[in-house]
Image (tube, grey):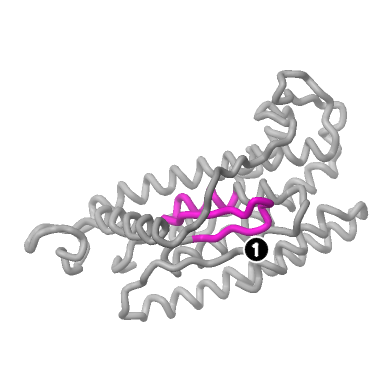
Amino acid sequence: MKHLDRIAALLAKAERTDNPIEAELYLAKAQALATQASVDLAVARARIAKREAREQPTNKTIHIGEPAQRANRHLVALFLSIGHCNALKIDIAHNSTYVIAYGMPSDIEVCETLYASLATQMATSATAWLKRGEWRGDRYRSREGYAKEHTSQTARAAFYTAFIERIAQRLREAYEQEVARQSQRVVDIAPEEFGAVMGEKVTGELVLRAKEIEVRDFYRSSSSARGRWKGYSGSVSRQGGAASLAGREAAARARLGSSREVTSKGPGLSA
């Protein structure tokens, strides 16, 4: 998605600049692009709905940020939270500058758009909160257990960490609700395709599980990734003081879009 590279660049510029007016301009442009991406996705969904052929798993490389950008690990964590609730498997570059998403094409597209929106909302809300100066004089608990006074960098890190954790919680809850809803739906498809015998009812939950297995098998046969991604390794723990509280509150207010953007339907399910 072309929008993502431009959004990532604008967010990076907003974070680097010391000029608050420039930062607001960059964030405004990023927000406009994120909104446009949602419009593009709506058009794409209409086309996808008309396709008769069943989707097949694929993979796509998605740009996160430039090397040595402080926010990269947070942005990767955000994408992981979205992808895991949309039946994606994800490989991560050693320097967190890009990820490789494995899944159904429409699911990857949905995750890209939701990521663009949430990354922009996260950066915008963090910048606005930091600008108010409530972090000055506040303390956080370091990973070593010491109480330390916040800098603007540690306050932003605490805000981002809490924001992402709350978003992940909201997405998990939405996913569980969708699975429960799909367990009550009977899907009008060829049952033998999903392991059922002729005449047995096939639920939407079974289709979702079948898709997850299909993506998992595709990932195992396609990925060459080794090792484990360590995530954010800075000094700020989950006890980030006022910054953590502000991040959780911003995530609670964040727009997740439609239910289709929160958790994807399985192959063959109609709206």
Residue 148 location in percent, x, y? Answer: 81, 23
**Image: 16 above or below 30:** above
Residue shown at the point (55%, 43%) measured from the top left: 228
Question: Is 159 within the magenta?
Answer: no
Residue shown at the point (79%, 47%) measured from the top left: 128
Question: Is 91 within the magenta?
Answer: yes
Q: Quadrant of residue 22?
A: bottom right
Q: Quadrant of the C terminus?
A: bottom left
Residue 263 location in percent, x, y? Answer: 43, 55
Q: Which residue is mark 1?
A: 63
Residue shown at the point (73%, 49%) measured from the top left: 71
Residue 140 location in percent, x, y? Answer: 76, 26
Left or right side of 54 for 259: right
Q: Amino acid at mark 1?
A: His
Q: Which residues are magenta?
A: 78-101
Q: Quadrant of the N terminus?
A: bottom right
As helix, strand or loop, the secondary structure at mark 1 comes to strand
Left or right side of 41 for 207: left
Residue shown at the point (54%, 50%) measured from the top left: 80
Circle 1 residues within 10 Å: few <14, some 14–19, many ≥20: some
Left or right side of 37 for 209: left
